[in-house]
Image (cartoon, rainbow, N blue to C red):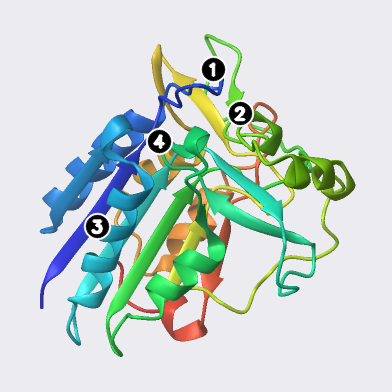
């Protein structure tokens, strides 16, 4: 069995006025954790993480796997959305991961990811950890903050008007600013751990002066306790998030077999 991973961290978003602080640390932390677990890791940070580089690296990760292999893909950076053009989204929005060159209209859409993940051979374990915003507004609050904050937290959402230049698309965006009534749930890789619901933000947090994603920090700390299954791991994360300081609700998507299957 081969164990490989791709870890992405983007703090720098040129031309958007929306740089982040903790995403590069997230990617470096995941790289360290996964190497300790026997993974061969490719790490792309900031300017290395342009759309074409992301597509090529992720396609290579998935398409060259063989039955029994274990793959991990982590992304820390901005998430956003555009109005849906093909009618396959109940909420009228196509979500995306934001590459470094998004200001040049380089988007990594959910449809793009679905196409890449569809190349996964049967019986390959694929774990996708996305610590980014997808859309909308904050949800409920809970007690017990995850950590003390030494600076104001940032949300990992890049609003479409920050990067969309096509006026026809810009004219349509205000109509889609309403929170979605439902989210797309049919197309996922074997297992997806997201930093928040589709209608929430993921937060760029601060831990003793060191920036990290709130979900990433919780996920790594709970992973070090060696949970037996992804479902057990997720339950431990959910005991920490949402919190009063970080009102985001991590989600775990995948079939029963994947949720109860092996940890990576």
What's the distance in space between the residues labelled 1 and 3, CA to CA? Answer: 36 Å
Give the label, 4 or 2, closer to the camera.
4
Q: Earlier in the sequence, mark 4 or mark 2?
A: 4
Residue 152 percent coordinates (x, y): 61, 13
Residue 26 percent coordinates (x, y): 35, 36
Q: Which residue is denoted by mark 4 in the rendering?
A: 100
Q: Residues within 10 Å of mark 3 (few under 14, many from 20)?
A: some
Q: Is residue 117 visible?
A: yes
| 138 displayed left or right of 29 | right
- Kindly state the secondary structure of the residue where label 1 is placed: loop
- Kindly state the secondary structure of the residue where label 4 is placed: loop
Compared with 115, 235 (above or below) is above
Q: Which residue is denoted by mark 1 in the rendering?
A: 148
| 133 displayed left or right of 4 | right
**Quarter of image, res 29:** top left
Q: Earlier in the sequence, mark 1 or mark 3?
A: 3
- Kindly state the secondary structure of the residue where label 3 is placed: helix
Q: Which residue is denoted by mark 3 in the rendering?
A: 57
Q: Earlier in the sequence, mark 4 or mark 3?
A: 3
What's the distance in space between the residues labelled 3 and 2, CA to CA? Answer: 36 Å
């Amino acid at each position: 069995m081969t164990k490989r991973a791709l870890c992405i961290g983007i703090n720098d978003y040129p031309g958007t006025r929306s740089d982040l602080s903790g995403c590069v640390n997230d990617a470096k932390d995941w790289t360290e954790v996964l190497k300790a677990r026997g993974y061969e890791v490719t790490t792309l940070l900031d300017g290395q993480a342009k759309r074409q580089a992301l597509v090529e690296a992720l396609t290579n990760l998935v398409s060259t796997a063989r039955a029994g292999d274990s793959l991990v893909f982590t992304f820390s950076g901005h998430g956003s959305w555009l109005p849906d053009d093909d009618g396959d989204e109940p909420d009228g929005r196509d979500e995306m991961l934001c590459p470094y060159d998004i200001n040049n209209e380089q988007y990594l859409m959910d449809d793009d990811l679905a196409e890449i993940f569809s190349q996964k051979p049967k019986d390959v374990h694929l774990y996708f950890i996305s610590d980014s915003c997808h859309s909308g507004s904050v949800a409920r609050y809970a007690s017990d903050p995850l950590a003390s904050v030494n600076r104001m937290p940032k949300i990992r959402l890049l609003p479409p008007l920050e990067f969309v230049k096509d006026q026809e698309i810009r004219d349509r965006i205000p109509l889609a600013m309403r929170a979605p009534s439902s989210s797309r749930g049919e197309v996922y890789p074997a297992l997806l751990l997201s930093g928040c619901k589709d209608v929430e933000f993921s937060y760029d947090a601060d831990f003793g002066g060191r920036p990290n994603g709130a979900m990433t920090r919780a996920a790594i700390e709970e992973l070090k306790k060696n949970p037996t299954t992804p479902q057990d791991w997720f339950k431990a994360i959910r005991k920490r998030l949402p919190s009063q300081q970080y009102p985001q609700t991590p989600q775990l998507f995948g079939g029963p077999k994947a949720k109860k299957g092996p940890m990576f």
